[in-house]
Amino acid sequence: MEVRSGIRKIVFIAVITAVLETAKFSLNAIANVELISLLTIVLTLYFGWKISLPSLLLFAGIESIWWGVSIWTVTYFYVWPVLILLTWLLRKQMNRFTAACLSSFYGLAFGLLCSLTTFVIAGFSAAFAWWTAGIPYDLIHGISNFLIAWFLFDPLMNMFEKLHLKI
């Protein structure tokens, strides 16, 4: 039975990763508007970090293969786990408002989190310049994340409840 359960988890992680990639590509044309943050929150709440973490790391790997390894693709390997951790820590207080605020905060902080890689590679001045140049995009990211989570959090959570998906 354990082998069957392990195979089921691997297949489920692959399917979730495919959903994440599809969600990412579906909104690629709109800068800093994405579904990945909300999906990360919902997946972590519903399935736990043991499913969401490997899915997001696989997602980051596929993004690196698809777009090539660069500073931003490297950041994906630590920024998504940060959101998983924050979601996990706030899971008992999570509702539509909390999810929207967390998603918004995350969008606003995304550039700052990503600038850590630039800091390691090029130092404080380069990281600060990179972060401040991206603030308008972080504002779009934060506002759009709030709206997306506000309108889609409850329907997504309800969908998972109705499907009775358990791993």
Image (spheres, helix red, strand yellow):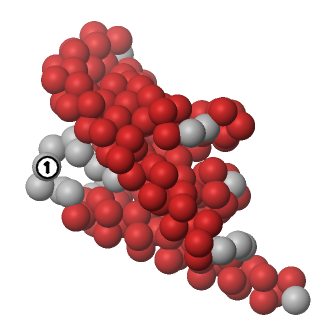
Give percent across and percent down for residue 74: 40, 45
The residue wearing badge 1 is 30
Give percent across and percent down for residue 21: 35, 66
Q: Is residue 121 visible in the rendered structure shown here?
A: no
Q: Residue at x 64, y 57 (%)?
A: 46
Q: Residue at x 54, y 57 (%)?
A: 157
| Quadrant containing the N terminus in the rendered view | bottom right
List the single residue furthest toward the top. 125
Secondary element type, mark 1: loop
Q: Is residue 151 left or right of residue 50?
A: left
Give percent across and percent down for residue 144: 26, 38
Q: Is residue 44 left or right of residue 80?
A: right
Q: Is residue 24 left or right of residue 11?
A: left
Quarter assignment of residue 94: top right
* Observer-nearest of 22 and 112: 22
Quarter assignment of residue 127: top left
List the single residue furthest toward the left. 29
Q: Is residue 10 left or right of residue 140?
A: right
Q: Residue at x 49, y 40 (%)?
A: 96
Give percent across and percent down for residue 40: 50, 51
Q: Is residue 149 visible in the rendered structure shown here?
A: yes
Identify the amino acid type marked 1. Answer: Ile
Q: Residue at x 45, y 58 (%)?
A: 155
Would you place residue 117 above or below residue 123 in this image?
Answer: below
Q: Residues within 10 Å of mark 1 (few under 14, many from 20)?
A: few
| Quadrant containing the C terminus in the rendered view | bottom right
Q: How many marks?
A: 1
Would you place residue 8 above or below residue 128 in this image?
Answer: below
* Observer-nearest of 56 and 72: 56
